[in-house]
Amino acid sequence: MEPTTTERLRASGIPEQYHPFFAERGLGGLAEKMGIVFEEMGPEHSVARMPVEGNTQPAGLLHGGAHLVLAETLGSIASNIAAGPGKMAVGVDISATHQRAITSGWVTGTCTALHLGGSLCVHEVVMRDDAGRRLSTARITNMVVDRRG
């Protein structure tokens, strides 16, 4: 039997207070496929984890794009929460610098707001390994627009 929306949100670590938000908008299939699980969620500070296993490139390292998926998931969700009712945030820029490779374990992304405005939200996301070593640093900018339909 297919899990319910509530079961899927709980499995992804989405706090109960945000279930109505995600029931309406959805979490996004990619975050679920990548195994991203949230530990904290809010517009100014969010934390999520992702397994290395299943998200590697052919050489066995965590794929650089996986870093960006984690960063964009965190920054986009934080920006959409900040945008509020009737608004939505859409990504306009993302970049990352990779400092260290990882081949196993978990990656933890910590998302911190640099700017939460009425038209732009900017977040920095730092990814670390289980030992707390910095793996990569990303910056994501989202534009806040009126929600259609």
Image (spheres, helix red, strand yellow):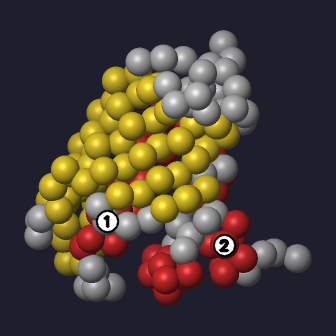
Left or right, residue 92 beside residue 51:
left
Tell me what residue is drawn at x 53 percent, y 52 percent. 48
Outermost residue on the top side: it is 59
Residue 68 or 134: which is nearer the viewer?
134
Outermost residue on the right side: it is 1
Percent x, y of residue 14: 56, 70
Tell me what residue is drawn at x 66 percent, y 50 percent. 35
Tell me what residue is drawn at x 19 percent, y 50 percent. 114
Outermost residue on the front side: it is 131
Label 1 residue SS = loop
**Amino acid residing under circle 2:** Arg
Q: Residues within 10 Å of mark 1 (few under 14, many from 20)?
A: many
Label 2 residue SS = helix
Above or below, 115 relative to 86: above
Percent x, y of residue 29: 59, 59
Which circle's residue, 2 or 1, is located before the other in the chain?
2
| Residue at mark 2 | 10
Quadrant of the rendered image containing residue 68: top left
Classify the position of the C terminus by image quarter: bottom left
Q: Residues within 10 Å of mark 2 (few under 14, many from 20)?
A: some
Q: Residue 43 carries which label?
A: 1
Above or below, 43 relative to 49: below
Tell me what residue is drawn at x 33 percent, y 72 percent. 81
